Amino acid sequence: MGQQNFEKQIDSLLNLMTLEEKVGQMNLYSGFYDATGPAPKGGNAVEKYEHLKKGWVGAMLNVRGAEQTKKLQEIVVNETRLGIPLLFGLDVVHGQKTLAPIPLAEAASWDLQAIENSAKIAADEAAAEGVHWTFAPMVDISRDARWGRVMEGAGEDTYLGSKIAIARVKGFQGEDLSAPNTIAACAKHFAAYGFAEAGRDYNTVDVGTYTLYNMVLPPFKAATGAGVKTFMNAFNILNGVPATGDAMLQREILKGKWNFDGFVVSDWGSVAEMIAHGHAKDSTHAAELAANAGSDMDMASGSYLKNLTGLVKEGKVDESKIDDAVRRILRVKFELGLFEDPYRYSDIDREKERIYHPDHQAGVLEMAKKSIVLLKNDGNVLPLDKDQKGIVVIGDLADDKNSPLGSWRLASDDDSAVSFLEGMDAYTKEYTFVQGPTAFYSASFLQHVKVNETDTSGIQEAVEAAKSAEVVIMVLGEHGFMSGESRSRTTIDIPVVQKKLLKAVYEVNKNIVLVLMNGRPLTITWEAENIPAILETWQLGSQTGNAIAQVLFGDYNPSGKLPMTFPRSVGQVPIYYNHYSTGRPVNKEGNVFWSHYADEENSPLYPFGHGLSYTSFQYSDLQVDATDPKNVKVSVSVTNTGNRAGEEVVQLYLQDPYASIVRPVKELKGFEKIMLEAGTSKTVSFNLTDKELGFYNQQYEWVVEPGSFNVMVGTNSQEGLSGSFVVDQ
Ligand code: NOJ
């Protein structure tokens, strides 16, 4: 359905609104009381409730449920002067109740259709719970595995990240935003939040314009191209200005150059946080800076409501800016169909029908299988025979129904994941499970996980069981709440007691399959050297156990590829495949003066794009045809040389070896996921146009510089067939 034009209706509404009512639309409160219960009795809930009735609240977050949202909507529709419906927002990041894998895991699928479908499932359930708007997708590029929020993004690469941003926006918003099963998406955090120094959340960001334009902004731009309705700004500073108060980002680039006609919401409290940053004098000043810079809606700080009316009267914020912000907010409300029917999304029968729908479970199971990455499989330990005897499963996480749900699951039910063991049960009951030491003492969304760092009791029992096992499956890693917002770590190892357990078991039985659960790349150097088979399963959501079991027993041939580099040591971080060369990239002179570490290699443990299959693929016959410099054709033949069908992500990397501004050693510029039956081949073709060959210069202009290019097509960012071509202009 084409987008309807609501501008006339918005004009008439704006004409009717008082300044206070306009500012009210720009105010986003967090849920403050149980709408189905009695009216609030104390604290600031009473005040907020009064604000709601006065029309001083345009949107709310953290309210969900058909009944709750309906009750709150009734207050606004029936009791405010103009009855402008509320917008209900929530962090629907990888599902509402039925949970898909965490976004980083989904990115490992490189399967855009599956990712779009996963967002569609999330939207369907969220909309059925009365939610209109998700604070997703997070499209921040990050190269720092210490940062806990890497779980929420698509990894380190701009090209892959842009494609995934589009898929997620399309999945959430669908074709028709006013349909009762689609919701408005939000590209966040604008911008460069993923470059927090030292991987510490909320920390200072200092990126140059070149990195900003070429690495950070493209996924945001891609999201606008896909029609994303909202943006969220960020907690960080950029060139000394908090993103929330940054007019260059919000007005010049987003609303100017990119013609974005949706609205920008601040991050939680980020308007007021400009005071702590040292940019605003006080809350009034913060509101002035943010509104002038183009932040249209204030999440949770209350600074707009308190100050904007006065600021307009004093002439510090022009009313036209307020009108522009309100117009943008109303536009999204119109497009969602809320003026036609404010209760469209709050339908109790629909809620009952859609939540945990079997189709959704099937969808997230597919997504989960595709997200698993086979990191290592020496001697083809995997897949296991379906009648494999003598299996011993070790590790607390194997029995955990909560951790695999990940970090962002505000609406889901605790302990609702199919555990690893439950997944095993569907294949065989003939295994022994030994928990080993307690891995975590407590874990929740609001507190840090209490990790067992000392108590090794339980290791001996596991070692005894492992001695006579034919194969030992060890399920180890991070708890789902160890990554996510404000979950930065300085070490990114498997927690210490679990690692001791692994080493102790290894002493008595080396035939180990390591099933990793984690929300970020981990430093698993010892494991990669010693353990024959390693399966990266991240946090896979509701269907975790079923997905892993299908891979372990060979009913699904793993096809995931890493969307983020795995370092050898945390000291290498930030480590990413599309780095620059430096002036001293190799050890030419045989002395120490080249760019390296004294105590570790430069190379990663597992490179970006790495992932094995139960079959093998051979690349041959790379053809490059640059006759038309505006459309360079590259093709390669891929053959499945193993004995079972499998999927391969064919990856194309490009290098511009010298340019007016140095270019990365390589950059992903194309990929295709193909399925090949055993023994068959396929030719995969790519077209390279200005879009792939160019880059942004310091003036934020897109340029293609004539000259030679190197191209590599292969199975990951380090292995492939290489060619080159020249582009003359
Ligand atoms: C803060 C986070 O940074 C943001 O991503 C999220 O949407 C809001 N909190 C609301 O929960």
Image: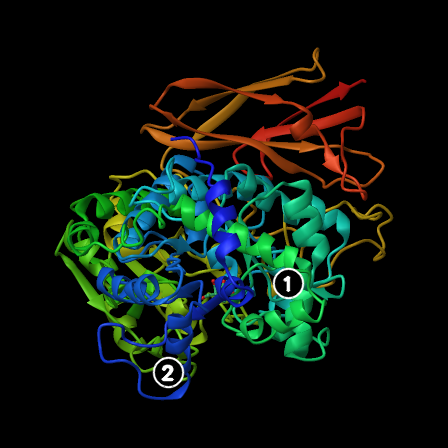
In the image, 289 versus 729, the foreground residue is 289
**Residue at x 49% of width, y 56% of height:** 16
Do we see residue 494 in this rendering?
no
Task: Please tell me in which quadrant of the rendered image residue 35 appears.
Answer: bottom left
Question: Which residue matches tag 1?
Answer: 291
Dot 1: element: helix
Q: Kindly report the distance in space between the C-alpha atoms of the residues bearing marks 1 and 2.
A: 27 Å
Q: Measuring 49% from the left and 48% from the top, which residue is drawn there?
A: 12
Q: Nearer the viewer, residue 288 or 121?
A: 288
x then y, percent, for residue 616: 42, 31
Residue at horizontal 56 percent and vertical 76 percent from the top: 306
Placement of 514 over or under 507, stated as above or below:
above
- Residue 729, numbered circle: none
Mark 1 crowd level (few <14, some 14–19, many ≥20, 10 Å Cα): many
**Viewer can see residue 258:** yes
Q: Nearer the viewer, residue 561 or 528?
A: 561
Q: Element at badge 2?
A: helix
Mark 1 vs mark 2: which is more N-terminal?
A: 2
Who's the residue at 26% across and 56% down the image? 542
Residue situated furthest top in the rendering: 627
In the rendered image, residue 251, in percent from the top left (x then y), is placed at 68, 51
Quadrant location of the N terminus in the rendered image: top left
Q: Of residues 708 and 54, which is closer to you in this image?
A: 54
Percent x, y for residue 458? Answer: 29, 78
Viewed as shown, does residue 519 lie left or right of 257?
left
Q: Amino acid at mark 2?
A: Val
Position in image of residue 493 (x %, y %)? 50, 67
Q: Is mark 1 within 8 Å of ligand 1?
A: no
Q: Tally the numbered discs.
A: 2
Q: Amino acid at mark 1?
A: Ala
| Residue occupied by mark 2 | 46
The quadrant the C terminus occupies is top right
